[in-house]
Image (cartoon, helix red, strand yellow):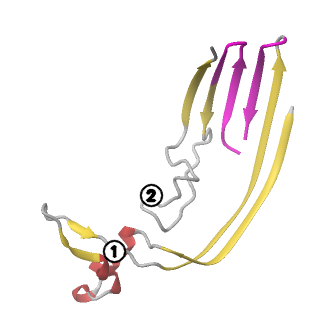
């Protein structure tokens, strides 16, 4: 059995990024006579009449502050010399894996608590999809064969 506990503290100030596109468009449309600096991202319409926001301005987006605790556990139960059954869990995923001599089967649940991803103001998804899963709870099964 293995277990780890990691504490993460990230504080970055004066970050530069893009405001979200809806924030920029709302700032433009809500200004008198479209006079907001946010309107500078609009460059006319395409052939279908849709707006073409093509230029985005970097801006000071404030600070990125994140603290967290990451807890991971795993347990391996050997069945014989070549086969084993293992279980693993962290703050939101659980899985079980069966190791046979020529194949491996893994089943599990990601985001078991159905937690919403962290909110980030920049980006079209209002989160960082490369870091946080915005799909919600999901189950999976995976099989691998070794020849």
Residue 30 visible from this viewpoint: no
Q: On the rendered image, what quadrant is the N terminus found in? A: top right
* Of the image marks 1 and 2, the number of the one nearer the N terminus: 1
The reply to whether the magenta stretch includes residue 104 is: yes
Query: Is residue 124 depicted above or below 31 in this figure?
Result: above
- How packed mark 1 is, by other alpha carbons closer than 10 Å (few <14, some 14-19, many 20 or more), is few
Name which residue lies at 71% across and 18% down.
Answer: 98
- x%, y% of residue 63? 61, 75
> In this picture, which residue range is highlighted in magenta?
81-106
Query: Is residue 18 depicted above or below 66 in this figure?
Result: below
- x%, y% of residue 50? 19, 64
- x%, y% of residue 88? 74, 32
Residue that mark 1 sits on? 55
The reply to whether the magenta stretch includes residue 101 is: yes
SS of the residue under disc 2? loop
- How packed mark 2 is, by other alpha carbons closer than 10 Å (few <14, some 14-19, many 20 or more), is few
Q: Nearer the viewer, residue 123 or 143?
A: 143
When asked about the image quadrant of residue 49, the answer is bottom left
- x%, y% of residue 122? 48, 68
> How far apart are the alpha carbons under marks 1 and 2?
19 Å
Q: On the rendered image, what quadrant is the C terminus found in? A: top right
Q: Nearer the viewer, residue 136 or 53?
A: 53
Residue that mark 2 sits on? 125
Query: Is residue 54 depicted above or below 147 in this figure?
Result: below
């Amino acid at each position: 059995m293995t277990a780890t506990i990691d504490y993460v503290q990230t504080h970055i100030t004066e970050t530069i990024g893009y405001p979200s596109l809806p924030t920029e468009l709302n700032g433009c449309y809500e200004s008198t006579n479209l006079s907001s600096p946010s309107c500078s991202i609009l460059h006319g319409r395409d052939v279908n009449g849709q707006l073409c926001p093509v230029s985005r301005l970097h801006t000071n987006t404030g600070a990125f502050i994140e603290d967290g605790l990451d807890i991971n556990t795993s347990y391996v139960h050997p069945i014989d010399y070549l086969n084993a059954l293992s279980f693993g869990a962290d703050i939101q995923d659980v899985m079980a894996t069966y190791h046979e001599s020529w194949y491996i089967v893994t089943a599990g649940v990601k985001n078991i608590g159905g937690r919403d991803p962290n909110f980030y103001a920049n980006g079209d998804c209002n989160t960082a999809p490369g870091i946080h899963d915005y799909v919600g709870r999901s189950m999976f099964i995976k099989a691998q064969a070794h020849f």
